[in-house]
Amino acid sequence: MPPTETGCAALTIHQGPERGRVFALREGEVTIGRSSSATIRLRDGRRLVSGLHARILAEQGRWVLRDESRNGTWTRRGTSRRPRPVGPAPHVLVDGEVIVLTDGIELRFSSSAEPARRVRPPERSGRRLLVALAALVLGATAWLLARLLAP
C-alpha cells in the first residue's frame, strides 16, 4: 500500500524478545498485539500484551496512538525515564518517542522513511562481549602464573 500523506514511519522493538525488529507504518491503521489478527504481532510469553493492545492511525497528517488494552499503554519522550499513560484520548506520536506496552516490551516510533538507519536498539551484546573477554584474560593470566610458579 502506498504511503499516506503522513509519509513513511516505523516502529522498532526497542526492548523485548524481538529487539531490533522494524515494522514500517505505511497503512492508514496499524494494530499491535498478541493476536494473529494484529498487523504487528508481538511475542509475549508472559501474556501481558493484550490480543489487541493498541492502534496507530494516520489522522490529519499525524500518527496517532490509541490504547485498546485493559493493561494500559504508556509513552516516554526524550531522556525521560518515567512513562506517561496514554489514557482514553488519542495521543499524537513524535519522532523518537517510546511506546511502553508492558514492563519489558517497548517500541520506538520513528517518523523517518529509513528507520533502520536512524533508530538503533540499545547495545547490550557489547557488555556481554566485554565480560567474556575479561573472564578469558583472567583465566589465561591465572593459567600462566600457575605454570610460571610451578616447581
Image (spheres, rainbow, N blue to C red):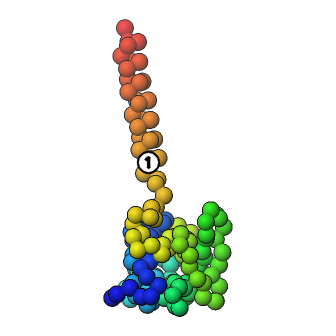
Percent from the top left, x then y, of residue 20? Answer: 41, 65
Tell me residue 87's x, y (percent).
65, 85
Estimate the x, y position of residue 53 in percent, counting from the top left: 51, 84
Name the residue at 45% across, 65% down.
119
Q: Is residue 147 left or right of residue 121?
A: left
90 sits to left or right of 109: right
Residue 108 or residue 31, whichever sits in front: 108
Read off the residue under disc 1: 126
Q: Is 43 in front, or is 124? A: 124
The quadrant of the rendering that contains the C terminus is top left
Q: Is residue 85 above or below residue 136?
A: below
* Residue in the picture at 47% in, 47% down: 127
* Residue 1, picture quadrant: bottom left
Work out whether 116 lies above or below 48.
above
Residue 142 at x, y = what percent? 42, 24
Q: How many marks?
A: 1
